Image: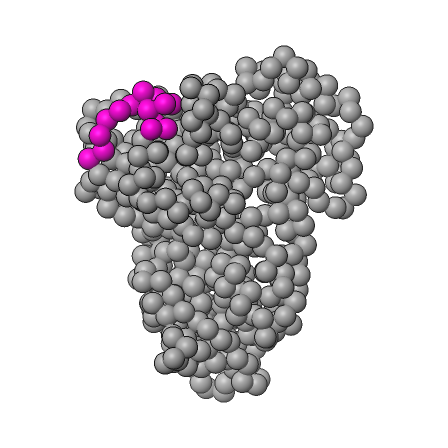
């Protein structure tokens, strides 16, 4: 590469790919050639801000964890600090066993830190199970993994799993507690159990933040951007200045001996792009296909990561419509209307106008539809989904108002499922890709589905590819 301008291809234009492009620009300098190839017709991936009744509204990820530094640091780096907004004080709720309750404080992803915090949501028998959990034989993972649902039912009985843990995990992963692994979804709890904390109640209690000092404000947990979360991706494109190629799938990756060749576009009329390094920031099924020839073990590990599909139904209601005084409602699986017959279609509602103070009129909210395996539900028409979600809204809140606008955004295969053994699969992926020169992986399939976790994988991938290129430049 002596004297040659380095060229890196970033495959995937979501937050992981665009954060990687930005980091590569920082590491390789203004002369480096960076090409982002995205098979859809837009950048942003699961970050999508659209127009709803004339206002900007997120129909993908609508917030990020503020306590994890990666997103906030990147926002500061690209000059969007002034646009950061935090949720209002409105509390979340959960609809379970036919009733809507405020989501209990002092739980960790639904795992209670004390019986008092969840007693109002449980039967007397369920509460007794929680209270007695520390007297059970200690949990011993012995380095292995376990399904969250099975562990919760074993320790607390079915009510905590069904009414608290499953709705929360369904909101994050569009998955079911019975199929999600403890180590990937609740690593902090798993670590405490590994260290000999034998009780889930005790482990959750140890996870609770210390009370703030007198007069000290508690740090907000979540944040968003006033112009929509997609504005971060738009700004990354402006700052990193990559060459952007939209509407082009990458079909084949080939190692040429001193660099890479990408076959892109249609099979009938392929185009070729030669480069020195690649950041692969695509969903698990795409990574499996692209790595099949060059890293079979890595490809096989990606193939074991299941994905779920979901849809967001965004509704704009007439000005003055009264939403409940809460940020949203999670709906436990299997819940039915008060007629005890009609099942709910939505798994959650976010009352955006209550949750975020920057949303003015009209009144905006979103319903989330779809858990892992619910493919038939998402084959319904947009009009059908809107009708079902509106019926759910009426059942939960009494609101009958006719929407002034709506948007249905479908996310096909968009949410990786962190199953039992997921941490080992990721270890296989990262070790295996480490033996392939000049290529690195990033994205939601690895260390977390949230925006900060995706950015962290992007930073690591960019650093690995840059180190490979800079090492070759020096030789």
Q: Is residue 203 magenta?
A: no
Q: Quadrant of residue 255?
A: bottom right
Q: Residue 167 at what x, y percent from top left?
A: 52, 32
For the view shown, which residue lies furthest in the front direction? Answer: 341
Q: Residue 372 at what x, y percent from top left?
A: 52, 44
For the view shown, which residue lies furthest in the top direction? Answer: 124
Query: Residue at 67% across / 21% down in the picture?
Result: 130
Q: Residue 266 at what x, y percent from top left?
A: 38, 75
Query: Residue at 66% across / 47% down in the picture?
Result: 420
Q: Nearer the viewer, residue 149 or 339?
A: 339
Residue 7 visible in the picture:
no
Residue 192 visible in the picture:
yes
Q: How many marks?
A: 0
Q: Which residues are magenta?
A: 391-404
Q: Quadrant of residue 100?
A: top left
Q: Quadrant of the C terminus?
A: bottom right
Residue 278 as seen in the image, left or right of residue 405: right
Colour mapping: one colour
Residue 176 as seen in the image, left or right of residue 192: left
Q: Is residue 40 above or below residue 395?
A: below
Q: Residue 250 at what x, y percent from top left?
A: 44, 71
Query: Residue at 59% across / 60% down in the picture?
Result: 303
Q: Quadrant of residue 153?
A: top right
Q: Nearer the viewer, residue 145 or 413?
A: 413
Query: Residue at 28% across / 43% down in the picture?
Result: 407
Residue 312 as seen in the image, left or right of residue 193: left
């Amino acid at each position: 590469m002596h004297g040659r301008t380095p060229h890196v291809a970033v495959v995937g234009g979501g937050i992981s790919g665009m954060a990687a492009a930005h980091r590569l620009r920082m590491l390789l300098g203004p002369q480096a050639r960076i090409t982002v190839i995205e098979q859809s017709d837009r950048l942003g991936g699961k970050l999508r801000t659209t127009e709803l009744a004339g206002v900007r509204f997120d129909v993908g990820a609508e917030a990020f964890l503020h306590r994890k530094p990666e997103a906030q640091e990147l926002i500061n780096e690209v000059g969007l600090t002034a646009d950061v907004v935090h949720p209002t004080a409105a509390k979340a709720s959960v609809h379970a066993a036919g009733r809507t309750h405020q989501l209990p404080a002092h739980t960790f992803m639904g795992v209670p830190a004390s019986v008092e915090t969840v007693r109002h949501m449980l039967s007397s028998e369920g509460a007794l199970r929680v209270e007695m959990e520390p007297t059970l034989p200690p949990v011993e993972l012995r380095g292995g993994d376990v399904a969250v649902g099975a562990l919760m039912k074993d320790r607390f009985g079915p009510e905590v799993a069904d009414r608290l843990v499953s709705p929360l995990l369904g909101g994050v992963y569009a998955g079911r507690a019975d199929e999600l692994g403890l180590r990937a979804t609740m690593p902090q709890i798993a670590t405490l159990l590994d260290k000999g904390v034998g009780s889930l109640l005790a482990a959750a209690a140890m996870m609770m933040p210390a009370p703030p000092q007198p007069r000290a404000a508690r740090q907000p947990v979540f944040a968003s951007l006033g112009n929509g979360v997609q504005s971060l991706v738009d700004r990354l494109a402006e700052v990193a200045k990559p060459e952007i190629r939209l509407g082009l799938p990458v079909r084949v990756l080939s190692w040429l001996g001193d660099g890479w060749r990408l076959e892109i576009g249609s099979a009938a009329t392929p185009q070729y792009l030669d480069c020195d390094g690649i950041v692969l920031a695509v969903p698990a099924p795409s990574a499996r296909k692209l790595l099949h020839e060059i890293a079979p073990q890595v490809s096989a590990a990606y193939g074991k990561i299941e994905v779920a599909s979901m849809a967001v139904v965004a509704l704009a209601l007439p000005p003055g419509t009264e939403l409940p005084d809460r940020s949203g409602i999670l709906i436990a699986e299997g819940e039915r209307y008060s007629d005890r017959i009609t099942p709910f279609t939505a798994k959650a509602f976010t009352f955006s106008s209550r949750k975020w103070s920057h949303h003015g009129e009209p009144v905006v909210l979103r319903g989330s539809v779809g858990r892992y395996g619910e493919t038939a539900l998402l084959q319904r028409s947009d009009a059908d989904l809107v009708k079902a979600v509106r019926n759910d809204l009426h059942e939960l809140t009494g609101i009958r108002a006719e929407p002034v606008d709506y948007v249905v955004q479908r996310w096909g295969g968009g949410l990786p499922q962190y199953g039992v053994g997921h941490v080992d699969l990721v270890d296989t992926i990262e070790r295996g890709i480490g033996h392939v020169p000049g290529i690195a992986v990033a994205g939601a399939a690895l260390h977390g589905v949230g925006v900060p976790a995706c950015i962290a994988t992007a930073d690591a991938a960019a650093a690995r590819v840059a180190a490979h290129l800079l090492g070759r430049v020096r030789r």
